[in-house]
Image (cartoon, grey):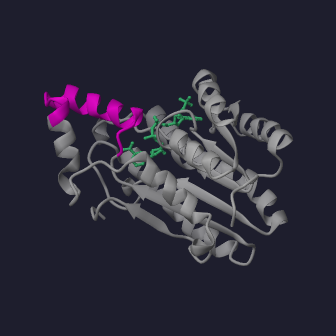
Amino acid sequence: MSMVGQHIVVTGGGSGVGAETARVFANAGASVTVLGRRIAQLEKLAKSIGGLPVSADVTDPAALKAALDTAREEFGPVAVAVANAGTAPSAPFEKISAHDFNETLAVNLGGVFHLWQMTLPDMKANGWGRLIAIASTAGLKGYVYVSPYCAAKHGVVGLTRSLAQEIGTSGVTANAICPGFIETPLLEKSVEAIAAKTGMTAAETHKSLLSGNPQKRFVSTREVAQTALWLCSDAAASVNGHALALSGGEV
Ligand code: NAP
């Protein structure tokens, strides 16, 4: 399947994994919409790849729908929806506020639900489409101090497996990519929080994060983006309902 002229929407497209995914698909010829809350970084990225920046909070269905309508006016029906927006506040279980719990589920799980539900009709009408979630190894195993994040990412894996059963004959597939730790702004916030709590240096924190990874290195944003592109290739036509771990063998 050629990506030339295909409309891809990437949530959280202004930084980290989302920005790299936007670049990789733009290089493959796709028409790329990048969506997030901070419009300035989206505009900068979009300018560099000839894409469209749209501002919306993925936890606000009305705002997300309006942003997708704007994107369709520019690039037509959505063929690939990458639900990548995420947040990962960290705290011991007993110190997590109800607000932080709800917010973490709303962004990491609700954001996938809304984006996929709003774009699946475009894909069904075309007879081809790709629903892709950037989940995490936290969707496949537990980690300390991020229980709401782990709950949300496990939820994404469950959503993916269930939806894959429903859309099997539609030409659309749903998959979750589950990377291990990646050096992005999200990880740096976690490193700062861990270092502040434990007194470890940033280097020691990095080392401890990699202790469970047999390859002892961070996953790159490019590896994640290229995996998303591969999911759009003919080679991946039968890959549906998977949780693809990119973790050097950690899970
Ligand atoms: P990042 O650079 O902080 O990206 C997160 C993006 O999500 C930001 O661009 C942010 O933009 C957007 N976002 C957050 N809340 C949003 C909301 N309510 N509505 C719309 N957009 C929102 O971090 P990243 O590491 O690339 O994260 C991307 C994805 O990879 C996340 O789902 C994360 O869980 C997953 N992941 C990361 C790692 C890692 O170690 N970094 C590992 C495995 C999986 P705005 O603030 O402008 O909205």
Toward which corner of the image does residue 2 lie, by quadrant? bottom right
User: Which residue appears at 50% of the width and 59% of the height?
Assistant: 227
Q: Is residue 228 left or right of residue 194?
A: right
Q: Is residue 112 left or right of residue 193?
A: right
Q: Is residue 54 magenta?
A: no
Front residue of this view, candidates 234 and 17: 234
Image location (x, y in percent) of residue 30 = 69, 50
Q: Is residue 151 visible?
A: yes
Image location (x, y in percent) of residue 246 = 38, 60
Name the residue at the top extreme.
40
Count of numbered labels shown in the rendering: 0
Image quarter in which the N terminus is found: bottom right
User: Which residue appears at 71% of the width and 63% of the height?
Assistant: 129
Q: Is residue 36 visible?
A: no
Q: Is residue 198 magenta?
A: yes
115 vs 48: above or below: below
Toward which corner of the image does residue 215 lie, by quadrant? bottom left
96 vs 122: above or below: above
Front residue of this view, candidates 86 and 102: 86
Image location (x, y in percent) of residue 152 = 47, 50
Provide the residue span drawn in magenta: 182-203
User: Which residue appears at 73% of the width and 33% of the height?
Assistant: 63
Image location (x, y in percent) of residue 225 = 50, 51
User: Which residue appears at 58% of the width and 38% of the height?
Assistant: 13
Classified by dominant secondary structure, the portion drawn in magenta counts as helix
Front residue of this view, candidates 73 and 159: 73
Front residue of this view, candidates 164 and 236: 236
226 vs 84: above or below: below
Image quarter in which the C terminus is found: bottom left
Q: Is residue 147 left or right of residue 210?
A: right
